[in-house]
Structure formats: structure tokens, C-alpha cells
Amino acid sequence: MHLPKEKILFKSPFRKELETLLPFAEKAIRERAAIWSPFVSAELTEEVKNKFNNLNDIRLLFNGGFPSAERKRICFLRSEEEMIFTSLDIPIKGINIKGNFLFDRAKQNDFRDLLHELHVPADEIGDIWLIRDRGAQAICSKKCADSINQQYGKLREVEISIQALDLSEMEIPFHRPEKIINTVEASTRIDAIASAGFGLSRSKIAAQIKQGYLRLNWALNNQPSKSVNTGDLIHLEKKGSLKILNIDKTKKERWRIKLLRQ
């Protein structure tokens, strides 16, 4: 069995990233084993799904530690291998980065930078989220979690400690169920539609767009006036995603828009 490499890479904006994943897929076919990739971004996950969707020789499983995780590891399996997902040895674990940040607020990227300073490779780290003012928790590879377990250090002036956790011990971020949203807007501007879909004021959405928190079809968008179309995906950091299911013009020259909030 051989994978159609050029077909997979053809016209992909993620050609380089796909080339690094192909050896994992080929190894799964060759060794008849479940082979896990490093953590990959949400946009690359979607590209992998699109490119591997119609291939007969390989199937894929995705896991980021919890259902709504953005960064996930991909498990490549030979198609005829009968493996139950729950029986797989999923190489994912959690860590708790504990510290008192009541008077020295930290952001997700501060904790990601901290892990990089501890020589943790970027592709060994999954999602990171804040635990109020007590630090953060993160998903990472088992190897990573075990290697930094019980380490101490500082993030700026705050003393921190790191403890490895099983996934069952973690405070997993709340995941809202999918919801269909119908709205009527004066335009198809992304700030107006995102405002309706995420339930935030238009001025707040515009500010977050300008700060680089919003992606359109996984590409960074910093233009609040950008028009969107049916099929587009809007992703806002910490808020989830909106899929535009349909756009119709009303008799009063407004736009009736159907959204799927994920």
C-alpha cells in the first residue's frame, strides 16, 4: 500500500506541514500499528481531514485531551485494522502549573513561553487554559508531562510548581453544545455576524479582530469590515467557532443569516 503523496500535497497551503505528517501515516501502513503525530493546530487538523478523507488505505482519529480542544494529536491507522478508540494507548496527559497570580495576571501565551523555557518542544504542547488566578492547566504529551513533573520555577516574579495530572483530574474548559442561530443583519460584515453569533457587542468584536484574536477559514483576519460567505468558518479565541450555513437577502435589502455555533 502506498499513499498518493502528490494528491495529498496538491495545492495545499499547508504543504510543508503535511510533508512532516506523511511519514507517520506511512509508518502506520507499514507496521500495521497506531501511530500518533505531535500536536497540530486546528487549521492543520481540518486540512488533514480534507486531504485524507477519500483515501482507502488509512483512517484517522483525533484527540486533544477533551472534545473542544483546538490543538490535537492525530492517530494514523491502517484501514483494515480493527481497533477500538477507547482501547488505544493515547499518549496525552495533563499538567497543572500552580502559582498565585492574583496581583500579577498572566495570559495563556505566558505559560506557553514558560514551557518553551523549560525546553518543551512546541509540538509537545496542546491547549492551555487559565485556572482563575491560580495558574493554568495544559494538555501535553505523556513524555512532556513526565519530564517536567514536580519542577519549580518562576513566571516573572511568581513562584510556580508543575504537577503531572491524569485527564480525569483536570478542570477541563466548559464546552457549549452546538447551537443554530438565525439573525438578520444590515450587511455581511464579519464584525456584525460574529457579534450576533458569539453574543458580544460589535465594538468588542471589532476590538478583538484588530488585536488578532479572530480567524476566518483559519487565516488571521484583522479587518472588521471583511465580508463573509456561505460555508465560511469564523473562529474567535476562547469563544469557539461559527459556521455560516446560509445567507439570503430579504425583501427589505437586509441579510438573513443562519449560523452553527460550535
Image (cartoon, helix red, strand yellow):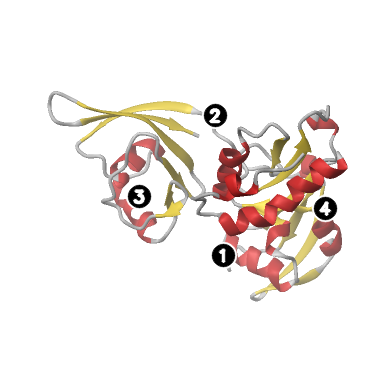
Q: Residue at x 76, y 54 (%)?
A: 95
Name the residue at the bottom extreme. Answer: 157
Mark toward the start of the polypeptide (3 vs 4): 4
The reply to whether callout 1 and callout 3 are in contact (CB within 8 Å) is: no
Name the residue at the top extreme. Answer: 251
The reply to whether callout 2 and callout 3 are in contact (CB within 8 Å) is: no
Name the residue at the left extreme. Answer: 252
Cα distance in 3D space between marks 1 and 3: 22 Å
**Depth order, front residue of 57/195:** 57
Q: Which mark is residue 177?
A: 2
| Mark 1 residue element | loop
Identify the residue position indicated by label 3 in the image.
205
Asked where in the image residue 117 lies, by quadrant, the reply is bottom right
Mark toward the start of the polypeptide (1 vs 3): 1
Residue 86 in view, yes or no: yes
In the displayed structure, 71 sits above or below 115; it is above
Mark toward the start of the polypeptide (2 vs 3): 2
Q: Which mark is residue 105?
A: 1
- Amino acid type, label 1: Arg
Q: Please tell me how crowded label 2 is: few (under 14), some (14-19), or many (20+) other residues with Cα within 10 Å.
A: few
Q: Mark 2, mark 1: which one is toward the viewer?
A: 2
Identify the residue position indicated by label 4 in the image.
142
- Amino acid type, label 2: Pro
Q: Residue at x 82, y 54 (%)?
A: 164
- Amino acid type, label 3: Ile
Q: Please tell me how crowded label 4 is: few (under 14), some (14-19), or many (20+) other residues with Cα within 10 Å.
A: some
Mark toward the start of the polypeptide (2 vs 4): 4
Quarter of the picture containing the N terminus is top right
Cα distance in 3D space between marks 4 and 1: 28 Å
Q: Please tell me how crowded label 1 is: few (under 14), some (14-19), or many (20+) other residues with Cα within 10 Å.
A: few
Q: Residue at x 18, y 31 (%)?
A: 254
Mark toward the start of the polypeptide (4 vs 1): 1
